[in-house]
Amino acid sequence: MDGFVRTAGERLTDVLQHADELSVLPGEADRDRPEAWIRIAVGQILLVVPPPHVSPPERRESRERQRVTLNIGDYRVTGIAHLRAGLERDVYLRATRPFLPLTEATLASADGSNAVEYEVLIVNTRWAQFLEA
């Protein structure tokens, strides 16, 4: 689905981490019609391509970069996870942070075909099977 999400200035990753549902306006819908917005349970989302967002420098932390490859649904995703020091071996981060942003990401069919590259791709690790981390 292509559409818009209200983030109130927050990073989409942060919204996904703490919301139960997202209000999404499908790409061609009229944003002035309240009934055009649909609600999606966050737990059902496999992955998200966020809009460009530059975090303020004070929110940036030093992170370890780790290349990961995973299957999620009918897709294979490869990208770089930016993990806090000490969490390098726990890529899933399932207990506290199910949504993991990957940079320099490639999304392809499970067989590796139809690859598309994204600057950032957010994956729901609860749906993911890690192949390499």
Image: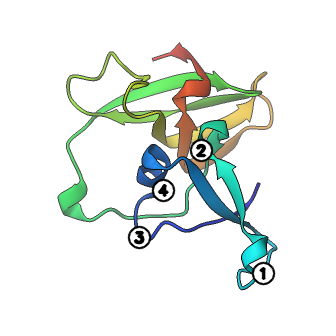
Q: What's the residue type where badge 3 is placed?
A: Gly
Mark nearer the N terminus (4 vs 1): 4
* Residue 9, disc: 3
Residue 84, image quadrant: top left
Q: Is residue 99 left or right of residue 71?
A: left
Q: Is 63 or 7 nearer to us in this picture?
A: 7
Which numbered disc covers residue 42?
A: 2
Left or right: residue 56 compared with residue 130: left
Colouring used for the render: rainbow
Q: CA distance from mark 3 to mark 1?
A: 21 Å
- Name the quadrant of the C terminus: top left
Quick one: SS at disc 4? Answer: helix
N-term mark: 1 or 2: 1
Q: Is residue 128 left or right of residue 18?
A: right
- Determine the secondary structure under disc 1: loop
Q: Which mark is residue 30?
A: 1
Q: How many marks?
A: 4
Q: Is residue 50 above or below residue 72?
A: below
- Local crowd size for mark 4, using a 10 Å CA cut-off: few (<14), some (14–19), many (≥20): many
- Between label 4 and label 2, give the one nearer the viewer: 2
- Label 1: how many Cα within 10 Å (few below 14, some 14–19, many 20+): few
Q: CA distance from mark 1 to mark 2?
A: 23 Å
Task: Determine the residue positioned at 56% across, 34% down.
Answer: 124
Judging by the rendered image, the residue that carries numbered circle 4 is 12
Q: Amino acid at mark 4?
A: Leu
Q: Position of residue 85 (x, y in %)?
A: 20, 28
Q: Mark 2: which secondary structure? A: helix
Of mark 3 and mark 1, the one earlier in the sequence is: 3
Q: Amino acid under label 2?
A: Val
- Which residue lies at the image location 53% right of the left edge and 43% below the top edge? 122
